[in-house]
Structure formats: structure tokens, C-alpha cells
Amino acid sequence: MFEELAARHKMTSVDPEPRWPALVSLLAVGLLYFALPANLVVGPRWLLLVLVLAMAIPTVFTWHRGYHEANQVLGYAMSGVVTLSLIGSVVMLVKTLPTHVESPIRLLASAGALWLTNILVFALWYWRLDAGGPHKRDLLLGHEDGAFLFPQMTMHLDAKKKAGEEHWSPTFVDYLFLAFNTSTALSPTDTSILSRWAKCLMMVQSLISLSVLALLAARAINILQ
């Protein structure tokens, strides 16, 4: 009984994290995929955008209705679809580079689009998986345990109170920043990685980013020569 009352108190004391940044990121992934050349996508270019839109509607519905388990499953499905699309396009980009089918400018633009997609896709994964996902994080007053050790989690309680962060919890922007650093520096910067699944995901993201950046550098050198 006490645990139920405590859980209700927490639910009424913490405002739910807004979900629209994640939804915007998914739509951005669909648009970036739509902008790729036909030989770098699996199926029609519009297919991923249509799938994201079709799955986004029930995702928003289940969240507003409180069907959190269904919402989580739909979120995993959407993230899985965009991840497979990203990996497929990166593989096609690697195969396309020696053939000179695309113009240098078009190829560089495609590699840049895939690099941005890589950031958004893995930001979504970190956001969905850390500490059980956004819904479970909403039930807690503050964020003290998870797959990532954010700087705010290491602050002394008095320092948190002075900064107005005593109930701090990561939002999508924090995971986006983490994913951006991983794709840019090929490693986390201000955040430590604690969980094995998070380490594996970050290795995959770094590998994809390294592949795309290596292709960009190789193509740039080829153009200059």
C-alpha cells in the first residue's frame, strides 16, 4: 500500500517528459531517407517516411491513453525499422563509392545525410532504453540510476538544490547530445557509460559514423586530386 501511494505521489509530482522531440527526430529521419538517391535506399524512397507516419499515429494514441506497454513496443518497432534502413543505406553507400555512379556532390550530400541520421537513430535508442524508457523515468523524482552517468548525477545534493536541479532527469536533448558526441568524437565526452548494452550500441554507432566519415574524407581527397 505504501509503495502504491508513493508511486502515485511521484506521478503527480513530476511533469511527464514531452515526447514531441523524439517524434520530430523520427520524421526528420524519414525526410533524410527520402532525400537520398534511389540507389542508396531499400525499396521506394518514400516508404520509410510513410512507415514512420503510420506508426507514429498509434504511438501518440497509446501514450495519451496510458497504454504504456503498447507504446513501448511501438517505439521499439519504429526504432528498429529506421535502424535497419540506416544500416542498409550505409552498406549501399560503401558499395556505390568505387562505381562513380553518383556525382561527387550528390555522394557527399548523401553521406552527410546518413551521418545525421546516425545521430538521430541512436539518440532515439538511448532515450527509449535508458532506465526503462521515458515512462519509467517519469515515475521517479530525479534520475539516480541508469545506463549513462550524466554530470548532473554526480553533483552533491546541496549543489543540485542551488542549481534548481534536485529533481533533474535526462530528456531527449541529453541523449541527442550524447549521440552527437559519439558520432563526432567517436566516444562519449562528459557522460560515462555504465551498461553493457549501452556500450555495444555506442560501438555500433561509432563504427557507422567512422565508416561514413572515412568515405567523406576519401571522396574529398579524390575530388581534390
Image: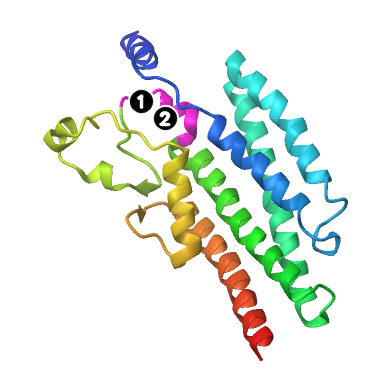
Q: Which mark is residue 20?
A: none
Where residue 79 appears, x then y in whole percent?
65, 43
Say if 75 sits above or below 189 in the image: above
Q: Quadrant of residue 217?
A: bottom right
Where residue 158 appears, x then y in whole percent?
12, 34
Where residue 51 appears, x then y in whole percent?
78, 38
Q: Are marks 2 and 1 in contact (CB under 8 Å)?
A: yes
Q: Secondary structure at mark 2?
A: helix
Q: Quadrant of residue 53?
A: top right
Which color scheme did the rendering employ for the protein? rainbow
Quickly name the residue at label 2: 137
Quickly name the residue at label 1: 140
Q: Quadrant of residue 119?
A: bottom right
Q: Nearer the viewer, residue 164 or 140?
A: 164
Mostly what secondary structure, the magenta segment? Answer: helix
**Which residue in the rendered view is the most extreme toward the left?**
158
Q: Amino acid at mark 1?
A: Leu
Say if 86 sits above or below 57 in the image: below
Q: Amino acid at mark 2?
A: Arg
Task: Write the residue at 56% across / 37% down.
Answer: 22
Residue range (magenta):
132-141
Q: Nearer the viewer, residue 86 or 202?
A: 86
User: Is 217 situated left or right of 155 in this image?
Assistant: right
**136 in magenta:** yes
Q: Secondary structure at mark 1?
A: loop
Where residue 188 appears, x then y in whole percent?
40, 60
